[in-house]
């Protein structure tokens, strides 16, 4: 950071920018897929060999952590299954690659590191004389070389003889109920050692693996399948018979759950009411529960329940805090399989989920193959050729395919099947109504919209078009229930982050041709966002995670509608809100025009120019303003950013923004150069993601190419530390996926993609049915189609010399959505040196 572009040219150009990511610039022509020759679960894995779910699992603090877990599920699955190395809470996920003990295998619904868990359950194998139910007691040592993570199966070898107690400092209890109990309050920077005075309290002892537990885990949308193999070496001598067992933790401290053991059916069932974000937002979801049913392959020799460390042998039911259950098996049992279903509806629905997705006659191999097929159906549609020869830690195929894997997890489908018919009716629990609903549609939750509106939703229109209309119907269903579109929904609204960016999500779908939802209702919803302030607008500051508030939506809209900006002396994050509301207005105008509200669209487009009202001509920066029009301190008024990044936070009007700078486009380019060369760009957070593409929009696409490749190298790699910031439900990965293809949706409310610099020589996309017809595969032209993106020499040639779509020359660095989903060939001609392509002069 802090170097100039000329220094980059002289010192690191070929290594880090132009020949991304090859140190040599040599090109590997190996095509994907390349068959995985491993035996067992990994036969016919195809391109899934390039997916590394551990990318983003390393980080000491929450801010430098990708916030990911090596989870197993299917695309958009309701429940993800992960090894648990620590207890999760708000600002902590249940796995970190820095840890050395596994404390179980967890069903998690925590969508992102900054959000809370809801309805989790943890299963842990054991092979000791006494059952160890507590987190710090049950941890088993493992070696990283004995761990394998793929989208369809997770495998690890555990030391059954692990001694001592471990990692109490990594529990929710040690954090005092979590750094932000109930989702309110501030979050400490360091979420591991040292936070709130936490230190490791017990020593770690890792012995030889004279007895080991081999674990394999796979999953479907609502179920998991765990295989535990208990193996001892020939020289192992036991002082007394030791029987294998499995313990299940249902609830943690301060949460009262229920459990029932049925030894006749080899089944344990229970429920868990924990919802860690319970203090955020107006929707209390009072009767929320996560329900679980676990079915075992072996009969129980004995069983019991646990409350904390206290075991009740032979007890078949219990309720309470720190609640669990356990089952022991015969001494000679060497393999136990457990199939677990999760539901938010009922125990009966959990059993139905199990019988539909993972029935009694299914094998573990069946579960693995089903998960593998589900991911191959998505990721296997893409073939990449012509990549740089590089070390394994920087393989761009691994980064790209893992990015698409991450992006196709959210929003999550929270509906549950009523029958085996995939087209049949579904059921789901709504926290907004605190009741169960029946539907013929999917129902989606986990909406991190402040993050994902930027590129994630554009990605879904290309790679998962069959789900987009249903997602929009979910947004409108939430509006029906609450009178507001969601901001950050995690079962219910949490009021986290700012602005009404669901307006942009709807505009994105509409501008990309998706119309199978109620457009008039969409207009009603976004119009309310644009013109009706929150009910307590003039009484609250609306600081981040302010507890027990009504729907925040556009806090400060009262002043914004009065004089064009949010007053810094009356509302928090006022400058960022002003800029976001200007963009939201542009998005609302898109919806208005589609439904024929021409006058309203014109008024909103005019209001979308309000960003200029916080432009400080003297400093050449955006700046917060007070109610009387005076400037606030330049460090005030920002949301997860500063004056540098927010000066460029005009996604919908690059020309208008350039016109504010002294010198027009040249002045804006100089400011962009100062932004990047001065080390101000923080790609680890979303407001920066469109910024390098502004170079292209103001006539300097060669500068965009250099910056984009530098950002990709500096912020992504193929290791567990491969994300510079929180993944945030696919947005970090969506940036890389698009950028590697050569374009990015800088204005996500439109159908435009800004051209950057493709990383690969040839990418073949077998687009899903409906990609070209708004998600309706049955319409004329709605079948699968192939798109080839060619960029010969791209790994060593960063600059675009020419661009064509099906032979039609493109002279401006912008592609339309129709160019991508409707074309057969997008062809880049690349150059080693900057070209004049895409430059169209000064304003």
Image (spheres, rainbow, N blue to C red):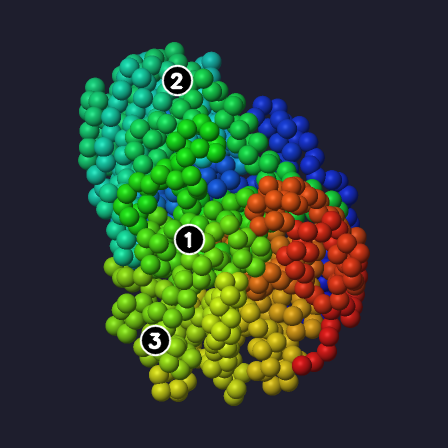
Pick the quarter of the image with the C terminus.
Answer: bottom right
Residue that numbered label 3 is attached to: 558
- Label 1: how many Cα within 10 Å (few below 14, some 14–19, many 20+): many
Out of 782 and 226, give the one closest to the viewer.
782
- Separation (CA) of disc 1 from disc 3: 25 Å
- Comparing 397 with 100, the one in front is 397
Dot 3 falls on a residue whose secondary structure is: helix
Residue at left 20%, top 22%? 315
Instruction: Give the left or right position of residue 492, taking residue 647 as reference.
Output: left
- Mark positioned earlier in the residue sequence (2 or 1): 2
Q: Element under label 2?
A: loop
Instruction: State which tag comes first along the sequence, 1 or 3.
Output: 1
Q: Vertical placement of 81 versus 184: above or below?
A: above
| Residue 399, above or below 621 | above
Seen from the viewer's position, the closer of residues 819 and 812 is 819
| Residue that mark 1 sits on | 475
| Spot occupied by residue 180 in the image (x, y as percentages of width and height) | 30, 55
Is residue 759 shown left or right of residue 169?
right
* Badge 2: residue crowd in 10 Å (few <14, some 14–19, many ≥20): some
Q: Position of residue 236 (x, y in %)?
A: 42, 16
Looking at the rendered structure, the secondary structure element under dot 1 is helix
Q: Earlier in the sequence, mark 2 or mark 3?
A: 2
Q: Residue at x 75, y 40 (%)?
A: 30
- Camera-near label (2 vs 3) is 3
* Circle on res. 69: none
- Residue at mark 2: 297
Query: Between marks 2 and 3, how big is the CA–CA gap?
Result: 61 Å
Q: Tell me what residue is drawn at x 54 percent, y 44 percent.
A: 466
Q: Are marks 2 and 3 in contact (CB under 8 Å)?
A: no
Give me the C-alpha separation between circle 2 and circle 1. 41 Å
Residue shown at the point (48%, 20%) measured from the top left? 363
Question: Residue 119 appears in which quarter of the rendering?
Answer: top left
């Amino acid at each position: 950071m802090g170097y100039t572009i000329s220094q980059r040219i002289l010192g690191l150009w070929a290594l880090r920018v132009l020949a991304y990511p090859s140190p040599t610039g040599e090109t590997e022509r190996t095509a994907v897929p390349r068959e995985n020759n491993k035996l067992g679960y990994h036969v016919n894995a195809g391109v899934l060999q390039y997916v590394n779910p551990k990318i983003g699992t390393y980080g000491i603090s929450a801010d430098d952590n990708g916030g990911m877990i090596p989870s197993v599920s299917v695309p958009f699955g309701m429940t993800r299954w992960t090894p648990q190395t620590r207890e999760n809470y708000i600002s902590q996920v249940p796995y970190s690659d820095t840890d050395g003990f596994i404390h179980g295998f967890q069903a998690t619904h925590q969508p992102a590191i900054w959000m809370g868990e809801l309805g989790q359950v943890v299963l842990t194998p054991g092979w000791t004389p006494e059952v160890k139910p507590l987190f710090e007691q049950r941890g088993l040592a493992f070696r990283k070389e004995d761990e394998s993570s793929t989208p369809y199966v997770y495998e690890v070898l555990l030391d059954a003889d692990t001694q001592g107690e471990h990692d109490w400092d990594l529990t929710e209890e040690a954090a005092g109920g979590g750094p932000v109990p109930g989702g309110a309050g501030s979050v400490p920077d360091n979420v591991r050692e040292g936070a709130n005075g936490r230190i490791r309290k017990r020593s770690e002892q890792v012995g030889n693996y004279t007895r080991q537990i081999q674990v394999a885990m796979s999953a479907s949308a609502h179920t998991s399948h765990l295989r535990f193999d208990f193996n001892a070496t020939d020289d192992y001598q036991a002082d007394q018979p030791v029987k294998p067992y499995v313990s299940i933790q249902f609830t943690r401290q301060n949460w009262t759950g229920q459990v029932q053991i049925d030894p006749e059916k080899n089944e344990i069932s229970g429920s868990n009411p924990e919802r860690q974000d319970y203090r955020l937002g107006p929707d209390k979801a009072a009767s929320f529960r996560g329900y679980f049913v676990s079915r075992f392959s072996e009969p129980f020799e004995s069983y019991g329940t646990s409350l904390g460390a206290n075991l009740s042998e032979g007890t078949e039911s219990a309720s309470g805090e720190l609640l669990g259950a356990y089952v022991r098996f015969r001494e000679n049992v060497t393999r136990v399989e457990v199939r677990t279903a999760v539901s938010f509806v009922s125990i009966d629905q959990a059993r139905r989920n199990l019988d539909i997705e993972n029935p009694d006659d299914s094998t573990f191999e069946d579960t693995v193959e089903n998960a593998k097929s589900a991911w191959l159906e998505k990721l296997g549609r893409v073939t990449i050729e012509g990549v740089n020869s590089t070390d394994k830690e920087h393989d761009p195929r691994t980064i790209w395919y893992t990015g698409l894997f991450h992006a196709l997890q959210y929003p999550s489908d929270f509906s549950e099947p009523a029958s085996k018919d995939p087209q049949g009716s579904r059921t789901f629990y709504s926290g907004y109504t605190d009741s169960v609903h029946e539907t013929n549609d999917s129902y989606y939750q986990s909406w991190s919209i402040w993050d994902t509106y930027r590129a994630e939703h554009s990605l879904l229109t290309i790679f998962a078009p069959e789900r987009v209309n249903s997602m929009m119907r979910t947004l409108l269903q939430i509006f029906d229930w609450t009178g507001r579109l969601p901001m950050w929904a995690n079962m219910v609204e949490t009021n986290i982050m700012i602005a009404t960016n669901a307006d942009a999500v709807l505009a994105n779908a509409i501008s990309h041709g998706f119309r199978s939802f109620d457009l008039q209702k969409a207009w009603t919803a976004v119009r309310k966002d644009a013109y009706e302030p929150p009910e307590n607008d003039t009484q609250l500051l609306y600081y981040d995670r302010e507890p027990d508030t009504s729907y925040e939506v556009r806090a400060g809209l009262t002043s914004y509608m009065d004089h064009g900006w949010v007053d810094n002396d009356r509302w928090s994050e006022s400058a960022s809100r002003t800029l976001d509301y200007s963009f939201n207005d542009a998005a609302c105008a898109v919806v208005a025009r589609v439904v024929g509200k021409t006058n309203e669209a014109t008024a909103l487009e005019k209001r979308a120019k309000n960003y200029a009202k916080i432009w400080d001509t003297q400093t050449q920066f955006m700046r917060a303003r007070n109610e009387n029009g005076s400037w606030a301190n330049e460090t005030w008024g920002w949301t997860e950013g500063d004056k540098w990044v927010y000066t460029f936070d005009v996604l919908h009007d690059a020309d208008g923004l350039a016109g504010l700078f002294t010198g027009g486009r040249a002045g804006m380019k100089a400011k962009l150069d100062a932004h990047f060369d001065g080390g101000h760009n923080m790609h680890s957070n979303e407001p920066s993601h469109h910024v390098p593409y502004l170079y292209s929009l103001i006539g300097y696409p060669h500068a965009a190419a250099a910056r984009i490749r530098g950002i990709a190298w500096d912020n992504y790699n193929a290791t567990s530390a491969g994300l510079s910031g929180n993944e945030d439900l696919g947005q970090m990965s969506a940036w890389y996926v698009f950028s590697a293809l050569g374009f990015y949706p800088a204005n996500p409310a439109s159908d435009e993609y800004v051209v950057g610099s493709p990383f690969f020589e040839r990418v073949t996309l077998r687009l899903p049915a409906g990609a070209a017809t708004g998600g309706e595969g049955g319409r004329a032209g709605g079948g699968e189609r192939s798109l080839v993106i060619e960029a010969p020499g791209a790994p060593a040639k960063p600059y675009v010399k020419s661009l064509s779509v099906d032979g039609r020359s493109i002279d401006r660095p912008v592609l339309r959505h129709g160019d991508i989903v409707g074309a057969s060939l997008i062809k880049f001609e690349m150059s080693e040196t900057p070209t004049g392509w895409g430059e169209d002069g000064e304003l």
